[in-house]
């Protein structure tokens, strides 16, 4: 009877330890603070809006839009700041390395302002250029081209 009790207790302890290891592997490593504007975080196969002080696991992708800013505050004390139009994948590593992994994903509002364009005008310009190119293709697709 005593042996059965000890075996049972050891089994329960082993399962509890395995649960703790599993929780550490799937746990969060940072939280998102100072959220401004539109900031998105990956959640499964989707991107969802960030809530201030939201916890995130390693592997989460953070994306800021033209109006977004956020700080990824690691439990280890490292703060990674994202400005507008940037992305960052949360992972465990040395702070100096993590700071270099922020990637710009589009023109900043400042660059568009220098060009005198709003975000809407820029998008309309890109769509218009694509439509113009497709229209030219349709007009000339059946025309023979002279070698001279």
Image (cartoon, helix red, strand yellow):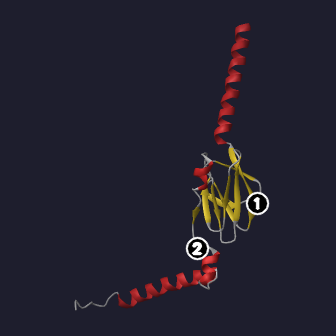
Q: Is residue 25 above or below residue 61?
A: above
- Which SS class for mark 2? loop
Left-right relation of 99 to 140 = right
Q: Do we see residue 42 in this rendering?
A: yes
- Which SS class for mark 1? strand
When asked about the image quadrant of residue 19, the answer is: top right
Label 2 to label 1, Cα distance in Å? 22 Å
Residue 64 percent location from the top left of the image: 65, 65
Residue at the disc numbered 2: 107
When asked about the image quadrant of residue 13, the answer is: top right
Residue 16 percent location from the top left of the image: 70, 28
Residue at the disc numbered 1: 34
Question: Along the polypeptide, which appears first: circle 2 or circle 1?
Answer: 1
User: In this orientation, which residue lies closer to the viewer: 96 or 103?
Assistant: 96
Image quadrant in which the N terminus is located: top right
Q: Residue at x 60, y 48 (%)?
A: 91
Image quadrant in which the C terminus is located: bottom left
Q: Residues within 10 Å of mark 2 (few under 14, many from 20)?
A: few
Q: Residue at x 49, y 85 (%)?
A: 129
Q: Residue at x 60, y 46 (%)?
A: 94
């Amino acid at each position: 009877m005593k042996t059965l009790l000890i075996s049972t207790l050891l089994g329960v302890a082993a399962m509890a330890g395995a649960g703790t290891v599993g929780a550490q592997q799937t746990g969060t490593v940072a939280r998102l603070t100072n959220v401004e504007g539109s900031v998105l975080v990956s959640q499964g196969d989707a991107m969802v809006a960030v809530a201030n002080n939201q916890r995130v696991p390693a592997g989460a992708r953070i994306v800021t839009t033209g109006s977004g800013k956020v700080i990824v505050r690691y439990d280890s004390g490292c703060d990674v700041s994202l400005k507008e139009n940037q992305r960052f994948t949360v992972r465990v590593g040395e702070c100096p390395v993590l700071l270099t992994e922020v990637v710009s994903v589009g023109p900043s509002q400042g660059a568009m302002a220098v060009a005198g364009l709003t975000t809407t005008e820029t998008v309309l310009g890109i769509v218009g250029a694509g439509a113009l190119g497709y229209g030219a293709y349709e007009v000339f697709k059946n025309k023979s081209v002279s070698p001279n």
